[in-house]
Image: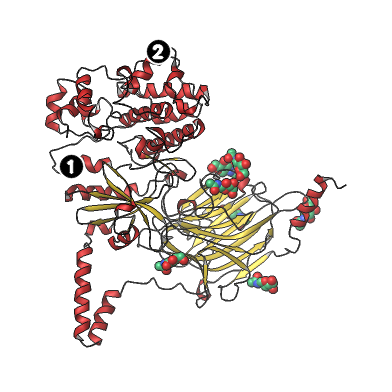
Amino acid sequence: MADPLILFCVLLLLSIPVSSQVSELFYPGFKHVGTNLTLEGIAEFENDLGILKLTNDTSRLLGHAFYTSPIRFKNSTNGKAFSFSTSFAFAIVPEYPKLGGHGFAFTIAPSKDLNSLPSQYLGLFNGSDIGNSSTHIFAIEFDTVQDFEFGDINDNHVGIDLNSLKSNASAEAAYYTDATTKQNFNLKSGKAIQAWIDYDSAQNVINVTISPRSSKPKTPLISFHVDLSPIFEEFMYVGFSASTGLLASSHYVLGWSFKIDGQSQPLHLASLPKIPIPRKDHTALKIGVSVAAIALTLSVISISIYLFIRKLKNAEPMESWELELGPHRYSYQELKKATKGFRGKELLGEGGFGQVFKGTLPISKTLVAVKRISNDSKQGLREFVAEIASIGRLRHRNLVQLLGWCRRRGDLMLVYDYMQNGSLDAYLFDEPKWVLSWEQRFGIIKGIASALHYLHEGFEQVVVHRDVKASNVLLDSEMNGRLGDFGLARLHEHGSNSNTTRVVGTLGYLAPELPRTGKASTGSDVYAFGALLLEVVCGRRPIEPNAKPGELVLVDWVWNRYKEGKVLEVVDPRLDGVYNEREVVMVVKLGLICSAHGPRARPNMRLVVRYLDGEVEIPEEVRPPSGSHVAGFDDFVSSFASSSSFDRMSCYSNKEMDASFASLSTSPLYLLHGQTR
Ligand SMILES: *[C@@H]1O[C@H](CO)[C@@H](O)[C@H](O)[C@H]1NC(C)=O
Ligand SMILES: *[C@@H]1O[C@H](CO)[C@@H](O)[C@H](O)[C@H]1NC(C)=O
Ligand SMILES: *[C@@H]1O[C@H](CO)[C@@H](O)[C@H](O)[C@H]1NC(C)=O
Ligand SMILES: *[C@@H]1O[C@H](CO)[C@@H](O)[C@H](O)[C@H]1NC(C)=O
Ligand SMILES: *[C@@H]1O[C@H](CO)[C@@H](O)[C@H](O)[C@H]1NC(C)=O
Ligand SMILES: *[C@@H]1O[C@H](CO)[C@@H](O)[C@H](O)[C@H]1NC(C)=O
Ligand SMILES: *[C@@H]1O[C@H](CO)[C@@H](O)[C@H](O)[C@H]1NC(C)=O
């Protein structure tokens, strides 16, 4: 009988390729090498040109090209990584001249099939595996988008990535003309650039050098001390990976040379294939010429006129400020087609900001959610669209990714990743689709806390969400919570009349100071997050018109039970008692702390995240939160209890109202009462 362990070892040995004696590669162009490089994603050879194209300039693509056989990167006797050197020529041609996306990377990986995503992950990682040392991924990134999630220094840098996209060393793209003079240059210029990567395993040093010329600068751009032995497995695949996101570039490799334990052969830019000149849109000109050429056939003209009028009806002229924007601008036609003409059947939901439709983008067949917002104010729209440019750069795995936008007359359309499992409220209230387990709920809460922390502190400017609530928490295919609609509330705050400031938010999630100050803050987001925590534990809305009198306002009810030491009585009965008691109590306490009356008494999101991660113990003492102990509340409730639009009602007020009510009460409910619609 064979010992299973021995059998396993034999199988393991058999599975290691023995034939791989390759230690040198040389591709001065890619005309006749189709069989030795494995392509994946949309990577392809442009055979007539002899270049390797990893991606074109369409959104959210990825492309890989790896040398087909694995290469021995380590001495099997002593486990020490070998020295290697490589040089390659590449070009990045962005869709818009100044906005590239997302970049590409020279990659050494244990497998050719990376289980990876496009956009900020550069086709190397899938989000959950970043920083995990079992990925064994070595990459030199040439990154043209600044991702705050990974601490990128700017949108034009080179970085050394070890098992992560948080570069262990990075530098702005530049080369040294002599030992001290540094010349910056643009990676996404569309011109050929040569890169050299040299690893010396005796010194444990890796050097990265780039230049727009063939001659190698003497001083490397980055020289980093590292022993790659723990990163490499004995056999590794070597090649390239590139991806596009909201912003897109074509990524080309023009030539490549690689050698283990020695100097790779030099490449000469002049003798490598040339990148195709970026196509310019000459369609208008061509149509003009051909119409003349057909010599004014009457029928052609009439068809043209018909088409032209139809186009005019649908097209919206670009305004200069719109041209400067980053995120992808979809054409109205494209979105109309995607949503089957904004058909009622495709309607996913309707919120305070407008209708949301499900759609399938015509070219990429990507499922998207298209949010259509009507706004009559040109000024407000302009400011808002400017804001989209920055929202489009927000990246976090617990935010619903904005893919692009479109404007048509007063309508603004925002295109988002489609979230398979809809919004959280559908799983919590009334008759849920199915019951979320406590584990799922806790995971969702943690995800949303991390997203809010990112909005508040992780971006170059503070982003206040302003409308945190269960219906803005969306669930992806793996039931991860993702926060949607960030930044949108700003649009409504701008209002149609510049003298008016509207307070946007949803009843029950509105911090008490909001209507008074009219200013949303990170503290008011924390308040709303507190309400969300309690909802998730209790499985009911912050204000439940049909509840028994003492249970009307969720915070009050939870507080009373907590005070009586019967906190577990508030837990959603649908959980059937299956939950982690310690976590539940912690989340309830945190919900109460976040619901404190004064913004200063509430923790910030950084602290909230640490509480949830168990890094910091939640305080023993919890002070009474801000509930309904405000005069006028009962009136308000009785006038609303019968209203069917109660639950999702957005509240708004203007400054004059604020002024007159501020002296009467600090309660938002007064304002609502005075301004019911
Ligand atoms: C491609 O592989 C073949 C054998 O499989 C080898 O003879 C040839 O030299 C390889 N070409 C390159 C450019 O590595
Ligand atoms: C880019 O590649 C995708 C996928 O192969 C293709 O559908 C699309 O038409 C290409 N775009 C351009 C501009 O060539
Ligand atoms: C591997 O390491 C052993 C022990 O240090 C050494 O004798 C041998 O020459 C090395 N092999 C290679 C291929 O470098
Ligand atoms: C990400 O990749 C790792 C390893 O390649 C894999 O174990 C994990 O399941 C992947 N996660 C997702 C979400 O695909
Ligand atoms: C790293 O990845 C491995 C395999 O994909 C997984 O088993 C392990 O839990 C991961 N470690 C961390 C810290 O995520
Ligand atoms: C590289 O950076 C990661 C964090 O991003 C760190 O865990 C790792 O130790 C670093 N490796 C080296 C060799 O500096
Ligand atoms: C890396 O660069 C340094 C100079 O910064 C040089 O002394 C060293 O020899 C270089 N190493 C390799 C492997 O190119």
Q: Which residue is mark 1?
A: 495
Q: Which residue is mark 2?
A: 563
Indicate the quadrant containing the C terminus: top left, top right, bottom left or bottom right. top left
| Label disc, if present, on residue 268 of the rendered structure | none
Q: Residues within 10 Å of mark 2 (few under 14, many from 20)?
A: few
What separation in Å lies between label 1 and label 2 (alpha carbons)?
Answer: 42 Å
Q: Nearer the viewer, residue 657 or 648?
A: 648
In the rendered image, residue 395, in percent from the top left (x then y), is placed at 41, 46
Q: Secondary structure at mark 1?
A: loop
Q: Is residue 23 left or right of residue 54?
A: right
Q: Is residue 238 left or right of residue 247?
A: right
Q: Residues within 10 Å of mark 1 (few under 14, many from 20)?
A: many
Work out whether residue 501 can be spotted: yes
Q: Nearer the viewer, residue 320 or 259?
A: 320
Please, which residue is most extreme toward the right here?
1
Q: Secondary structure at mark 2?
A: helix
Q: Nearer the viewer, residue 464 or 424?
A: 424
Q: Is residue 538 above or below residue 127?
A: above
Ligand 7 in which quarter: bottom right
